[in-house]
Amino acid sequence: MPKRLKPGLVPGLFIITIIYFALGFVNILTALLAVFCMAIPFILLSKSGKKLWCHHYCPRASLISLTGKPRARWHRLPKMFTDGYLRKIMLWYFGLNLLFITGSTIRIAMGAMEPMEHVRLFIALPLPGPLPQLLTTPVAIPGWLSHLSYRFYSMMLSSTLLGVALSRIYRPRAWCAVCPVGSLSNTLLKKTPIVRE
Ligand code: SF4
């Protein structure tokens, strides 16, 4: 008999988000772990037919639950959060971001472009210089790999900052109303009948 999970997020998972960003200062290649953060929600969904990640395991939801304002000061979410408008914009933003990341990484690997070895927030706001690195790799990292790592780090940092800001402005998990991973999970749940044994 499978063990039933307690309702709500597993406590303390916010530490994973903090460790992820801290590891960027150890070696930027660790930013590639973002791939797991993007894949695991859908793997769990396909196996269980439930949004296990969103309901129990999401480290970002854990962080914004911590940073969010207390219930007595919550604000109602504006209509664009609940009518699907902002959700669509975030899905486009996320999709375009992934497209830019893939395209620029391929161009760099082909020698058609210089790598961008710095953090760039919200696709458009560059932060000065590369992150300080505590550990360097024994062999030189190819430019495209370093670029890819910085792009993932930038994407994760931008969306986390947005999530934290919304948690302070409206309520702890306001970001979840427009999060692309949550939106895609909802769409898949509606469209794909998941067969369980
Ligand atoms: S909607 Fe996004 S941020 Fe919220 S729990 Fe799901 S994956 Fe995490």
Image (spheres, rainbow, N blue to C red):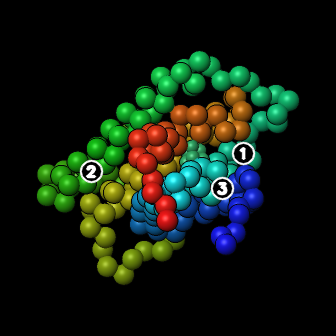
Q: Residues within 10 Å of mark 1 (few under 14, many from 20)?
A: many
Residue beneath label 2, please?
102
Where's residue 53, x and y in %?
A: 58, 55
Is there CB contact under 8 Å for labels 1 and 2? no
Residue 175 vs residue 131, the one in the foreground: 175
Is 62 on the left or on the right of 126, as rendered? Answer: right
Where's residue 17, x and y in %?
A: 60, 57
Residue 167 vs residue 123, the one in the foreground: 167
Q: Quadrant of residue 171?
A: top right
Q: Secondary structure at mark 1?
A: helix
How far is mark 1 from mark 3, CA to CA?
12 Å
Where's residue 56, x and y in %?
A: 66, 55
Q: Secondary structure at mark 3?
A: helix
Q: Nearer the viewer, mark 1 or mark 2?
A: 1
Residue beneath label 1, please?
65
Residue beneath label 3, please?
56
